[in-house]
Amino acid sequence: MIYQNRIIVDPKVMVGKPVIKGTRITVELILKLLSQGITVDELISQKYYPHLRKEDIYAAIEYARILVEEEKVYPLSK
């Protein structure tokens, strides 16, 4: 999946946080809900965000994965 088709960063939307395109739903919120145990199917259900698609959720996960993958880690000296 290519997250760029579904995730945008626009300073005019949610202060520039990455969001699902066409919404104000942040990647951060999706990751938070998933980490709390809410399933993908629950997220896209009527109870939460029925206008989201599974591909939106997977794009948010991919976006976060790429950020972590590109993170530079520097060893601390003792």
Image (cartoon, helix red, strand yellow):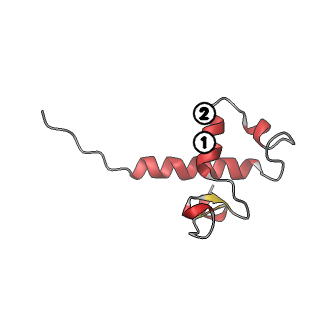
In the image, residue 17 lies at what x, y percent? 56, 59
Q: What's the amino acid at mark 1?
A: Leu
Labelled disc at residue 15? none
Identity of the residue drawn at 79% across and 47% down: 49
Can you see residue 2? no
Element under label 2?
Answer: helix
Element under label 1?
Answer: helix
Instruction: Give the crowd class for mark 1: few <14, some 14-19, many >=20 residues within 10 Å.
Output: some
Against 14, residue 29 (above or below) is above
Identity of the residue drawn at 77% across and 51% down: 53
Q: Is residue 72 left or right of residue 20?
A: left
Q: Residue furthest top?
A: 37
Q: Residue furthest left?
A: 78
* Residue corresponding to mark 2: 35
Instruction: Give the crowd class for mark 2: few <14, some 14-19, many >=20 residues within 10 Å.
Output: few
Labelled disc at residue 31? 1
Against 78, residue 65 (above or below) is below
